Image (cartoon, rainbow, N blue to C red):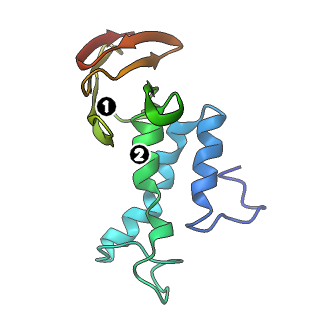
């Protein structure tokens, strides 16, 4: 779908839904190559993201900033698992990245994730949850419990 030139390309705004579809289909790591378009804006000197592209009439459009959400929700994998964010699900889709760190503000404090892929293929992760927040970390279809404080795992 992403590489099929016979179908209309999603606009910056609608790429949000493309990213969500990729996540749902288990291809969340495919959003990383799609971020090249946003890198071009930075290369052109933009400090905010435009409405449609480099020749857009609006150089500051909130709907084009959704990759920030995608990186935290899909790449770092931080999502509410229950209503009210009483439990967190962390299921990263790192793609080709070997290291990434991300944080999300939670009503009880900050959720922080740090991932490092080792050369032997294992994933070293440190996940910090605030207070008494609990959660589940999922990697390669294996689930690991999370509790408030620092959680360290070495996953294959």
Judge the density around disc 2: few (<14), some (14-19), many (≥20) Cα neighbours within 10 Å.
Answer: many
State the residue at coordinates (40%, 72%).
Answer: 49
Residue 64 against residue 3 in the figure, above or below: below
Does dot 2 land on a helix, a strand or a loop? Answer: helix
Find disc 2 in the rendering and name its residue: 71
Q: Nearer the viewer, residue 45 or 90?
A: 90
Discs 1/2, front: 2
Crowd band around label 1 with a 10 angstrom C-alpha radius: few (<14), some (14–19), many (20+) = few
Is residue 58 in view? yes
Count numbered badges in the picture: 2
| Closer to the camera in the image, 148 or 96 | 148
Q: Quadrant of residue 11?
A: bottom right
The residue positioned 43% from the left and 27% from the top of the image is 86
Instruction: Name, please, the residue furthest toward the bottom.
Output: 57
Sequence-wise, the earlier of marks 1 and 2 is: 2
The image quadrant of residue 85 is: top left
Question: 85 left or right of 131?
Answer: right
Q: Quadrant of the C terminus?
A: top left
**Image quadrant of residue 54?**
bottom left
Furthest residue in direction right, as rendered: 6
Label 1–label 2 contact, CB within 8 A: no
- Report which residue position mark 1 lands on: 98
| Inter-mark Cα distance, 1 to 2 | 14 Å
Task: Give residue 117's position: percent from left, percent from top.
Answer: 31, 23
Q: Secondary structure at mark 1?
A: loop
Residue 57 drawn at (x, y percent)? 48, 90
The residue depicted at 29 percent of the width and 73 percent of the height is: 47
43 in relation to 74, above or below: below
């Amino acid at each position: 779908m992403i590489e099929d030139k016979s179908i209309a390309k999603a606009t910056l705004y609608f790429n949000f839904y493309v990213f969500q579809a990729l996540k749902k289909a288990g291809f969340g790591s495919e959003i990383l190559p799609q971020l090249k378009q946003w890198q071009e804006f930075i290369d052109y000197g933009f400090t905010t993201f435009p409405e449609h592209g480099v020749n857009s009439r609006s150089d500051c459009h909130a709907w084009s900033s959704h990759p920030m959400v995608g990186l935290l929700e899909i790449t770092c994998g931080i999502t509410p698992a229950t209503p009210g964010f009483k439990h967190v699900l962390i299921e990263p889709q790192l793609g080709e990245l070997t290291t990434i760190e991300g944080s999300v503000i939670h009503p009880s404090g900050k959720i922080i994730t740090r991932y490092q892929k080792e050369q032997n293929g294992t994933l070293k992760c440190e996940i910090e949850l605030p207070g008494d927040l609990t959660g589940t970390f999922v990697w390669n279809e294996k689930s690991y419990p999370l509790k408030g404080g620092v959680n360290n795992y070495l996953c294959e």
